[in-house]
Amino acid sequence: MPIKVLAFATGPRRHGNSETLLDWVLASLGEEPGVVVEKFALNEIRVNPCRGCNACETLNKCVQRDDMDMLHDRIVEADCIVFATPIYCMGICSQGKALVDRAQVFRSRKYVLKLPVVPPERKGKRLGIFIAAAGQKMDYVFDGAIMSAKCFFHVIEVKDRDIEYLLVRGVDAAGEVETHPTAREEARATGKRAVARLREMRGPLAGSG
Amino acid sequence: MMVKVLGISGSPHRHGNTETLLDAFLEGAQGAGAATEKVILRDLDFTPCQGCNACHRKDGCIVQDELTPLFGRIAEADCLALASPIYTMGITAELKGLIDRSQYLWARKYIAKTLYYPREHLKRHKGVFISTAGQSWDYVFDGAFPIITAFFDITGFEYWDNLIANNMDRYGSIRGHPTALAEARDKGKRVVDVIGKAKERNPAPSGES
């Protein structure tokens, strides 16, 4: 069974700083044997904001029909979910927040309907990676975003201790992350650490077929 | 001197807890003699920020849609009440969509340095954040605060106060909350009094609000 990585570039600017960081992490993950990577740029697909109708609390599915339909099963099946966003106004960009909010269907499933989000044997074996790039350098610039990101990972059955973070400050202009002294190396290390943890979660037989 | 209060509801559903709280705030403000206006973001046709950074090089936003005149109304308001329920530990994607589009004002303020709000301006302009959350956690609004702080800073409002109520899941609705609606009406009245006095002491230069 391959290790399935599902990645979201949520920023409106294609190949911007947060997506570049994501690509570095995915390259680091993808060069490992047995790792399959699938990436979506929210800019290229359609994920509407949550309508707040709470219908998912009874229907166990969302009433909206858009690309979240095809993402839903992929989110359930992935071993590793990677979420990359630029920081806009001290938070996740609104496009990314729409995806986060649409995870409400998982929240309803988990906490209201008390149904499993993933099969029991896969609980505690999912990893999340949160990647953010901020133009500002304040030490608290990621605080608001991290709270929503954690919540997103919790409802899709990724535990707090299983979230890796790659947070890079002071990169704003297009391509600026390329000149960052340590970002590329940190991204690579994040990928390697993630693979090691995913293998550890699978146990000693991982990768043996 | 008439005080103008602009309430913006970022909730995707109408007449929910957050909008009801906003209504009570506007009612209090109206009772104190203010001219109030309510904008429902979900009724506006707008695109989130595209992250193109064109506003960093050339003044203004290249996107022209129904948010464009709204920013004009924000500039004319004496009090701005931003209302959003908490979704996934943050504000809704709709309100975040509005906030991200203020980037052109941020660029004026911090890059071109053509926009500056003097102390007297901030005395006359007050911002209030209105929110409700289902969860009982006392930190449930923490992810929203830095975003709201940034927006009020960019749009020239002193962050005057919050009107927040958590634990909606327990109370059933805001109408079941022991104090929130009365507090909202009271704060609506008080902010108008505060702004009215500030306008008398620090009158705006002619042509400005």
Image (spheres, rainbow, N blue to C red):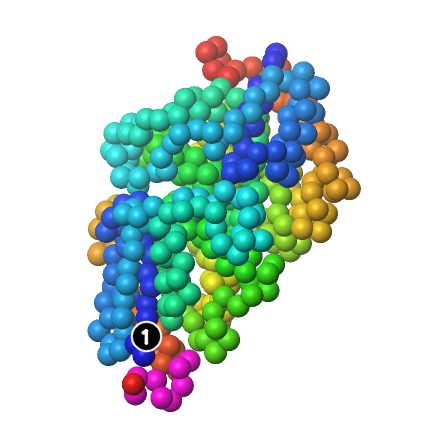
Q: Residue at x 60, y 20 (%)?
A: B36
The correct choice, above or below, for B78 with respect to A18 in the image is above
- Position in image of residue B72 (x %, y %): 43, 21
Which quadrant does the N terminus of chain A fall into?
bottom left
Is residue B82 among the parts visible in the rendering?
no
Residue that label 1 marks: A3
- Position in image of residue A76 (x %, y %): 42, 65
Position of A2 compared to A76: left or right? left
* Magenta span: A201-208
Please identify the residue farthest to the front as the structure is shown: A59
Which residue occupies the foreground of this view, A45 or A20?
Answer: A45
As for residue A49 lying within the magenta part, the answer is: no
Q: Residue at x 61, y 59 (%)?
A: A112
As for residue A205 lying within the magenta part, the answer is: yes
Q: Residue at x 38, y 89 (%)?
A: A204
Q: Residue at x 56, y 21 (%)?
A: B37
Position of B102 compared to B209: left or right? left
Q: Amino acid at mark 1?
A: Ile
